[in-house]
Image (cartoon, rainbow, N blue to C red):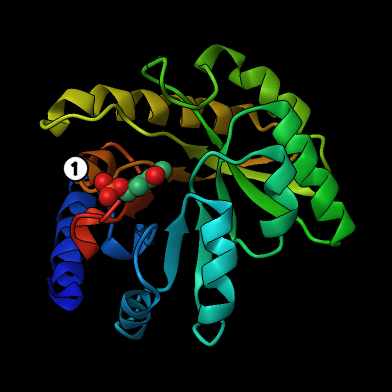
Amino acid sequence: MNIGTNLEMVYNRIEKAAAVSGRKKEDIKLVAVTKTIDIEIIKQAAELGMTSIGENRVQEIMNKYPQLEKYPLEWHMIGHLQKNKVKYIVDKVKLIHSVDNIALAEEINRRALKKNIIADILVQINVSGEESKYGLHPDSFYGFLEKAGDFKNVHIRGLMTIAPYTDNPEEVRPVFAELKKIFEYAKDEKITGVDMDYLSMGMTGDFTVAIEEGANIVRIGTGLFGRRKQ
Ligand SMILES: *Cc1c(COP(=O)(O)O)cnc(C)c1O
């Protein structure tokens, strides 16, 4: 496994998919998903120019953060976040992708206020309605935006989804298209405290399709670092 080669391959595919939707590769943010990946490997990736990394567990961020302080990294929280752990990461991460209930948004607001920062968040939507997945149901989403939009120390910056796992990404194209529709709708509503800047969708198996459908953040682990140990 060579991260440099993988990175180049991923960027090539991002570029092609971006072109399909009339954009450039610079318009798409690549978040390298480093969950379970060793520090030394992450350092290598950082030295190759990787700037954004995604983690899904608070404890792992806490362990890795001090070890990577020398690197100009932007941390993304992409996994399910429990309210009682918000305080540990709210001032460490650039963007929380996985906010799917109002109590969590409220706690982020409270902790951000204490640290005198504005926390950028995405709202995680469960487009496909899969029972096992976290994420807000599209029907309760508008009410969420109106409430969370009022929180002064939280800034809603867009939407995120995890598509159902599939071997054929064409099968999940409608999921991405649907989230893009919801994204445009929310943008047009111009709700106070809500900006639709980021659409985070697409992982190793489906990121080209996600970009073609409008993603501007993709979260890629396996495609960069190989199969995870755990
Ligand atoms: C693990 C993970 C990814 C990356 O998955 P790969 O298939 O390895 O690219 C993306 N998003 C979330 C939320 C994840 O937990």
Q: Is residue 82 above or below residue 17?
A: above
Callout 1 amino acid: Gly
Q: Residue at x 24, y 52 (%)?
A: 18
Q: Position of residue 10 (x, y in %)?
A: 18, 61
Toward which corner of the image does residue 201 lie, by quadrant? top left
On the image, which quarter does residue 133 sit in?
Answer: top left
Residue 36 in the image, given as x and y percentages of width and height = 37, 59
At mark 1, the secondary structure is loop
> Is 111 placed left or right of 134 in the picture?
right
Q: Nearer the viewer, residue 208 or 225?
A: 225
Task: Read off the residue under disc 1.
Answer: 205
**Residue plotted at (53% across, 38% down):** 80
Viewer-nearest residue: 172 or 92: 92
On whether ligand 1 comes within 8 Å of the CB at mark 1, the answer is: yes
Q: Quadrant of the N terminus?
A: bottom left
Is 209 on the left or on the right of 41, as rendered? left
Left or right of 176 in this view: 153: right
